[in-house]
Amino acid sequence: MSETTVVEAKNLDLTFPTNDGPVQALKDVNLSIEKGEFVSFIGPSGCGKTTFLRVMAALETPTGGTITVNGVSPEEARKSRAYGYVFQAAGLYPWRTIAGNIKLPLEIMGFSRSERDRRVKDVLQLVDLEGFGGKYPWQLSGGMQQRASIARALGFDADILLMDEPFGALDEIVRDHLNEQLLALWDRTGKTIGFVTHSIPEAVYLSTKIVVMSPRPGRITDVIDSPLPRKRPLEIRDTPEFIEIAHRVREGLRAGHGDD
């Protein structure tokens, strides 16, 4: 493992016990994620994309193989506040303002009031929500709520940001706008991002590395290192290079189905 390796999974398995017998969610997963990479996980529903993200976050425990985050176990990484996690739904408390929602983990972690205020101001600026800290979640659009959720995950300045389909429920126009903003945020902060999506264009547009997964049991069928430049206008989606990568992702998804 190199000094820049953030996540290292080797022969990772995860089997869930159920009333109908064991269900293997992940099988023999091997993957390295380097510092500063934007890695998207794509595959059919139930293929283990979210499960792998949750293993990284110590929200699930593998039943075989090994995984390290920053060279330590996911549990130790969680205790050291190595990552922020953004769920599919914004999950904001309706009785707290946007600033109050962002402050909540900082309060739990024991940051001083002045430090909480400073961090809230900084992350609201990062996600282009300046002036909205005093609003309540129901006063914001769905896209703005998701940006607030990202701000909350950024509040304690973790080096890793894990995002589980954060834009899946949004319309295409809003999604495009947030994809642009997320790329700009990644460029400014240099964070390592793990991102789950069902959208081929979204995976290709955002990522430096695309991990294609098969139907259950979740295996990796392809890992694609993107040759696209770091600065990516939306128009890049019409270029031959973009279309070629999207074609390879599609082929990887087909190959995964063919293994069943």
Image (cartoon, grey):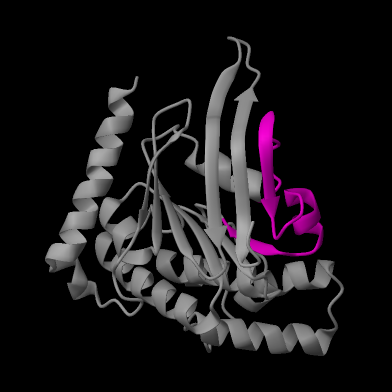
Apparent side of residue 54 relative to residue 229 in the rendered image (left or right): right
Magenta includes 139?
no
In which quadrant of the rendered image does the C terminus lie? Answer: top left
Q: Residue at x 75, y 67 (%)?
A: 105
Q: Residue 80 is drawn in which quadrant?
A: bottom right
Whether the magenta-drawn stretch holds residue 59 is answered as yes
Q: Tell me, yes or no, if residue 215 can be seen here.
A: yes
Tell me where residue 81 appears, x and y as whole percent. Answer: 75, 64
Q: Quadrant of residue 192?
A: bottom right
| Above or below 172: residue 31 | above
Residue drawn at x 41%, y 80% is 184
Residue 84: percent from left, percent from top: 64, 63
Between residues 188 and 124, which one lies in front from this camera angle?
188
Q: Is residue 28 above or below residue 153?
A: above
Q: Is residue 23 above or below residue 222?
A: above
Q: What residue lies at 20% left-to-right and 63% top-to-bottom?
A: 242
48 versus 112 height, above or below: above
Q: Name the spot of residue 147 as percent of width and height, x first.
A: 49, 71
**Looking at the image, which is closer to me, 254 or 83?**
254
Rendered residue at 50%/36% (across/down)? 48
Residue extending furthest top? 20
Toward which corner of the image does residue 52 lie, by quadrant? top right
Q: Is residue 244 left or right of residue 39?
A: left
Q: Which residues are magenta?
A: 57-86
